[in-house]
Image (cartoon, rainbow, N blue to C red):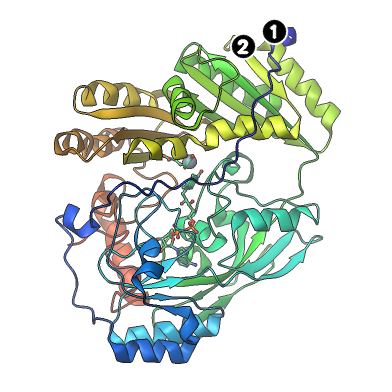
Amino acid sequence: MNLARILKTPLPIVSTKLLFCRALHVPLTASRLPHLHRKSFAKVTNDDIKQFEGILSSSRVLCAEEDIAGHCTDWTRVFRGTGSIVLKPKTTAEVSEILKYCNNRNLAVVPQGGLTGLVGGSVPVFDEVIISLSLMNKIIKIEPLAGVLVCQAGCVLQRLNDAVAEHGMTMPLDLGAKGACQIGGNVSTNAGGIRFLRYGSLHASVLGLEAVMADGSVVDNLSTLRKDNTGYDVKQLFIGSEGTLGIVTSVTIATPPKPKAITVCFVGCRSFADALKTYASAKASLGEILSACEFMDNDSMSLVKKNLGLVNPLGESYPFYVLLETSGSDGSHDEDKVTKFVEAGSSFENGTLTSEPSKIKNIWSLRENIAVALLRDGVQHKFDISVPVECMYDLVEIMRKRVHGLGAVSCVGYGHLGDGNLHLNITSRERIEELDNAIVPFVYEWTAQRKGSISAEHGLGVQKSQYIHFSKTPPAIALMRSIKSTLDPKGILNPYKVLPIE
Ligand code: FAD
Ligand code: 2HG
Ligand code: ZN
């Protein structure tokens, strides 16, 4: 591939700010999923409200319908509960008092971050008490030499990235919801995102963590040490447990140096096999500077154009697109490598290459806004699987045939190619039973047959808890249940989520 053939088309700048589609009527989760029955938790009384006002002051205890509605429906507009109270603590001591009280009273709770989770974990299923972490938004300290950030759980990811950037560092994770999601939510879902390829999982980047247990006791593990092998690493239990084992109140995150040079290369491929070849050759020739490798099919690109007006600089003329990013500390060294990669490329025909921040942002916005564009279609069927990368796209093709004629509006595939993580999304204008039945459990069965994961990065929430057995064995599920009952004997923390209902 000759560098001269690379297009340098400017793209319009489009904000990645989340767009909410309020028009769609969202049915109650419990009315749609017949396995869900309210457990025998207590109901919130006027006396409980007085007690909460004693802990927090009345301005941080919300009971008016208009204040609560937004906390009961999730971002995908698929999940809705009937919560009647939202509590907004500012300190760990307040979270501790709230949980101690709820545990004694047998009141179920749902921890809530930025509400951008995609599996219905952050909203009540019935009338659970909503504990919003949004006012726990203090940055506690930033240590450039050690490369660590210590902050409260309610800090929004974008703000943290901006804050550490002032000290020459970056956050080890980045995702389309960065303007709204909170670090506590990221940690609780073990969010992956577009920097996973470079910095790996939050299981490694979270150095310390403070959490409040169901009975109100505080586990203070807010260490800033890089190395600490004293006993079991209990903080790992809270990473990815989706608020079912404790409420994360503060975290220490390892923050790597901010890359000095970033280049983005966006190429069109004639087949998925060519997209894979592009990834393989990028790995081989870009090596340590390769920081992201994403793919999207042409239907995803047509959708962002149709629903959001975003224009693909390669003109929708390829069935697949690969977005590669390099980040390093020496621009000319990286440029040499990227040039060689592009010149050697035989698996892509055309592309655009840029190091200009505004153009980089525009190219990323094509990828990051696919979820937002899908939301504009209507009802969402979201899947987030990992399978051997060679067969990853087969599922999209199979599903297109399977849902044909059943009322689907879109059936698209895109995702984190470098992590073997496919996002299959099917949408429809309204909920159609025949379409639902054609999709689930088929997608999970197909994934299990290939020994894949039915949730690579979004978690299980209430959407996939009943399907955990497709990816985990009975002994593993039994062990999870015993951890849950040890840490939360009354089951008040985010009930109906993660573990299947027996
Ligand atoms: P919420 O949605 O509020 O909560 C998520 C779960 O965590 C819930 O179960 C909740 O109970 C629990 N929780 C929240 N805060 C706490 C806390 N302090 N203590 C205990 N439990 C808590 N995910 C990826 O992995 N990769 C992506 O690339 C990615 N991209 C996304 C792009 C868009 C546009 C959107 C809308 C979502 C995306 N997500 C992605 C989903 C992802 O899970 C969330 O964006 C994010 O990690 C959730 O953070 P949140 O603060 O919004 O949490
Ligand atoms: C992404 O990678 C997110 O964009 C969202 O994980 C995926 O909407 C989805 O299916
Ligand atoms: Zn993703």
Does residue 84 appear in this view? yes
- The label shown at residue 430 is none
Q: Image point 18% across, 69% down: which residue?
A: 38
Q: Residue drawn at (23%, 57%), measured in percent from left and top?
A: 28
The residue closer to the viewer here, 484 or 461, is 461
Q: Position of residue 115 (x, y in %)?
A: 44, 58
- The percent coordinates of residue 467 (x first, y second) are 25, 49
Q: Can residue 386 be seen from the camera position used here?
A: no
Task: Give me the C-alpha separation between circle 2 and circle 1.
Answer: 7 Å
Instruction: Give above or below for 43 relative to 81.
Output: below
**Which mark sits nearer the N-terminus, 2 or 1?**
1
Label 2–label 1 contact, CB within 8 A? yes
Q: Is residue 423 left or right of residue 260?
A: left
Q: Amino acid at mark 2?
A: Asn
Q: According to the image, label 2 marks what residue?
A: 350
**Residue type, numbered disc 1:** Arg
Q: Look at mark 1 in the image and give the residue it sits on.
A: 5
Q: Secondary structure at mark 1?
A: helix
Q: Secondary structure at mark 2?
A: strand
Residue 149: give x, y in percent of width and height.
Answer: 69, 63
Quarter of the figure with the C terminus: bottom left
Q: Residue at image x 24%, y 20%?
A: 401
The one nearer the camera, 264 or 429, is 429
Q: Label 2 crowding class (10 Å Cα cut-off): few <14, some 14-19, many 20+?
A: many
Left or right: 439 as drawn, with respect to 323: left
In-front residue for pair 115/151: 115
Residue 50 location, x and y as percent? Answer: 38, 91
Mark 1 Cα-neighbour bin, 10 Å: few <14, some 14–19, many ≥20: few
